């Protein structure tokens, strides 16, 4: 495979078979765009890494260490996708987190995925996943390594014409996409699901929210139902790799990318 | 560390940094006792491995392959603890499970933990965890690698006098221990929590249930509340490594190991 990974700074190294990352999914991660070797929105990603590590009681490595390792990986794939995985480190056996060694760093860069250019321009077709997200306030928002729900949900379809699936919780509230955060435009207001029970609180969601606040756009972070999505004036998805995709079709509902979607695309995601 | 691990049959090998086991916890595992190099209850463990792999759509390796690799590991630690982790294998990026390579096998043996002999004889002190288990029927019962809830729950205490913690769900039903399954004796009947919403359906739970049925002991698999645990005549925990521990103390309630506990210990766990 093209690309490069460093495990604790070592090229071509494997992960300790007793690492708690593989044993329990005991760790966190971030994925982001590289542009001419520079990780986009790096300060926000590092801040989230540190916050997510703190939530799990994992010692977050110094920013300079990660940044240097990322530079080595990015040199190989300067316009690819960077990823940092931090685990609680190796531990022989047992769930007790205080028995772990130092955290493990897995820093990698791989070529960017080849999404059709039309996705950002005309929008994407999406579906509603059958899997329902569980509620776990202790883990909600955190980009941790326990991602079997996302794997099972993404495994529900293989139709390449469907770009993303919406995930609902057990109360049938719409939470997010399998790999993205969701925004609606309802009568000029920006609406995005509350993530206090489940879901991943992504960096691009934070950036869109910050933009809305700075631009004086009314914003609601709250529970969202599927009928509300279907009735929304505009609908779009964001993540750090895809950036922004307008939603063009969901079941029998079609949208054209609307004015607020285009404005956010231009002002928040310009040049990337 | 003492012990041995084999990754896809290779000694001293590391795990591919792009393995989905570490990226998403996308896999399953089993842990079991070795006795003179022989894995106890191996047919049950292999059957569970195959069942859990099928539930996640992972191809389970042939029993002969795992058994041979286990033998190599067990030769190094003939009276230790064996473990098999199976992941969906390496995959560059993205949740879609059908993009994965062949499954990864991590087979290991390590020395047995040094639990005090009194645990099985006099019983253990346990506590109630603050963390509440989330409901996910799609994953309930499966011994998968998404174990952050267990890690966080086990991280709630460091007092070595407390041997285990009880996990409740969001409806305050008692589900299991952080690493064990729970049984109560209530007026001569054996009671164990229903695991259709959350929890791990362990091999020793299956063995105790099978024994109860064959011995004509009345058995109830149903929802259990904490007051019911406190009021139970007997209470014990099982897993494949600890075997059976009577519960001696939970908050202000004390028990002495009772007759049905002793009978199951003798008849189901004799000699191990």
Image: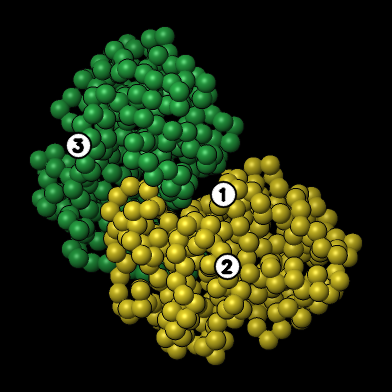
Chain colours: A yellow, B green
Give x and y (percent) for residue A47: 58, 71
Of the two numbered discs 2 and 3 in the rendering, the one whose residue sits closer to the viewer: 2
Question: Would you say the residues marked 3 and 1 are in contact, meaning their CB atoms lie under 8 Å apart?
Answer: no
Residue B221 visible in the picture: no
Give the residue displayed 26% in from the left and 30% down from the top.
B119
Q: Mark 1: which secondary structure?
A: loop
Q: Residues within 10 Å of mark 2 (few under 14, many from 20)?
A: many
CA–CA distance between discs 3 and 1? 36 Å
Quarter in which the C terminus of chain A is drawn: bottom right
**Mark before the other along the chain sequence, 2 or 1:** 2
Residue B137 position within the rendered picture, expressed as x and y whole percent measured from the top left = 53, 39
Name the residue: 30% across, 50% down. Answer: A93
The numbered dot on residue A48 is: 2
Task: Examine the rendered structure and indicate whether residue B160 appears above or below residue A67.
Answer: above
Q: Please determine if labels 2 and 1 lie on a single subunit.
A: yes
- The residue depicted at 80 percent of the width and 70 percent of the height is A212
- The residue that disc 1 covers is A138
Q: Is residue A172 above or below residue B249?
A: below
Front disc: 3 or 1: 1
In screen coordinates, is B244 left or right of A132?
left
Q: Residues under labels 2 and 3: Cα distance?
A: 44 Å
Q: Extreme right residue here?
A: A187
Task: Say what secondary structure mark 2 lies in.
Answer: helix
**Label 3: few (<14), some or many (≥20) within 10 Å?**
some
Q: CA distance from mark 2 to mark 1?
A: 16 Å
Between residues B52 and A190, which one lies in front from this camera angle? A190
Relative to the observer, which residue lies in front, A73 or B63? A73
Q: Are marks 2 and 1 in contact (CB under 8 Å)?
A: no
Residue in view at x 27 percent, y 67 percent: B14
């Amino acid at each position: 495979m093209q690309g490069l990974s460093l495990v604790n700074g070592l090229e071509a190294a494997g992960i300790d078979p007793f690492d708690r990352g593989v044993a329990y999914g005991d760790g966190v991660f971030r994925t982001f765009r590289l542009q001419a070797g520079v990780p986009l929105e790096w300060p926000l990603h590092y801040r989230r890494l540190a916050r997510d590590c703190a939530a799990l009681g994992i010692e977050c490595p110094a920013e300079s260490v990660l940044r240097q390792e990322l530079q080595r990986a990015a040199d190989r794939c300067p316009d690819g996708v960077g990823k940092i995985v931090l685990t609680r480190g190796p531990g022989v056996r047992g769930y007790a987190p205080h028995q772990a060694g130092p955290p493990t760093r897995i820093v990698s860069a791989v070529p960017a995925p080849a999404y059709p250019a039309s996705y950002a321009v005309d929008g994407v077709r999406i579906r509603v996943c059958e899997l329902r997200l569980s509620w776990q306030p202790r883990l909600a928002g955190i980009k941790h390594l326990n991602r079997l729900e996302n794997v099972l949900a993404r495994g529900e379809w293989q139709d390449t014409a469907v770009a993303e699936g919406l995930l609902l919780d057990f109360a049938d509230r719409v939470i997010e996409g399998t790999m993205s955060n969701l925004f609606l435009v309802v009568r000029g207001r920006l609406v995005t699901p509350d993530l206090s029970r489940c879901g991943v609180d992504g960096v691009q969601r934070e950036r869109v929210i910050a933009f809305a606040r700075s631009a004086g756009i009314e914003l609601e972070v709250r529970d969202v139902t599927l009928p509300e999505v279907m009735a929304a004036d505009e609908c779009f998805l964001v993540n750090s790799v895809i950036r922004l995709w307008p939603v063009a079709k969901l079941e029998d509902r079609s949208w054209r990318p609307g004015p607020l979607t285009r404005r956010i695309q231009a002002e928040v995601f310009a040049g990337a």
